[in-house]
Image (cartoon, rainbow, N blue to C red):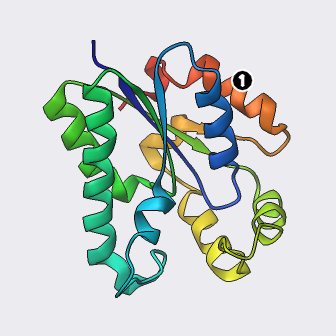
Amino acid sequence: MSGSLLILTGPPGAGKSTVARLVTEHAPRPTVHLHTDSFYVWIRTGFVPPYLPESARQNDVVLGVIAEAACGYARGGYDVVLDGVVGPWALDPFRDAAKRDGLDLFYVVLRPSLDVTLARGTARDATELTDVEPLTGMHGAFADLGELETHVMDTTDQTVEETANAVRRRARSAPYSL
C-alpha cells in the first residue's frame, strides 16, 4: 500500500518544521519527515541562497531531487510530510512525480501574519535565515495564492500544538488535495 505526500509550506518562521515534527512523531502510520533545507546544505561548492534570483537553476535541480525522494518513500508505503518553502511556483515536480506514481498529494500553507512571521524568523538560531528583507519577501510570496488560497491555514493566533492538531485533522482531506 502506497503512502501519501503532504507538502507543509509557508514562509520562513511560519512553524513548518516544528509542526511537521509534531505531526510525524505521533502519526498512526509509518511516516517520514523530509526537511527541504537538508537538501540545500548538502551543496558544498557553488551554493546560492535559494531566495536569490540567480538560484533558479539550483532550485529546479534540488526540487526535482526532493520530489523524487519524497515519492520514493511514499511508493514504499510511508506517509511523507515535506516541510519547506515550496510555493505554487515550485509545485510542478511534485505534481508530476505524484501523478506518475499514483500518489495522493496534499498542499498546506501555514501563513501567520507578517508581524508573527518576522518575530519568529528573526528570533531563530543564527544558522537559519533571520534577515528581515528576505523574510518579508518570502512572506509576500505567499500573500495571494489565487486558486490555492483555500490551502492556507492562518496560524497567527494558534500555538504550535493547535496548528499541529489542525494539520493532523484536516491536511490529508479533499480541500488540501492537489
Which quadrant is the N terminus positioned in? top left
Most foreground residue, 147 or 122 = 122
Q: How many C-alpha atoms fall within 10 Å of the one at disc 1: few (<14), some, or many (≥20)?
A: some
The three-letter amino acid code for the residue at tag 1 is: Asn
Most foreground residue, 163 or 178 = 163
* Residue 30 visible (yes or no): yes
Residue 49 in the image, given as x and y percentages of width and height: 48, 80
Residue identifier under label 1? 165
Residue 27 in the image, given as x and y percentages of width and height: 58, 20
The picture quadrant where one finds residue 135 is bottom right
In the image, taking residue 155 as reference, residue 142 lies left or right, namely: left
Up/down of 25 relative to 69, above or below:
above
Most foreground residue, 140 or 38 = 38
Residue 120 in the image, given as x and y percentages of width and height: 80, 61
In the image, taking residue 26 as reference, residue 66 lies left or right, namely: left
Q: Residue at x 40, y 53 (%)?
A: 88
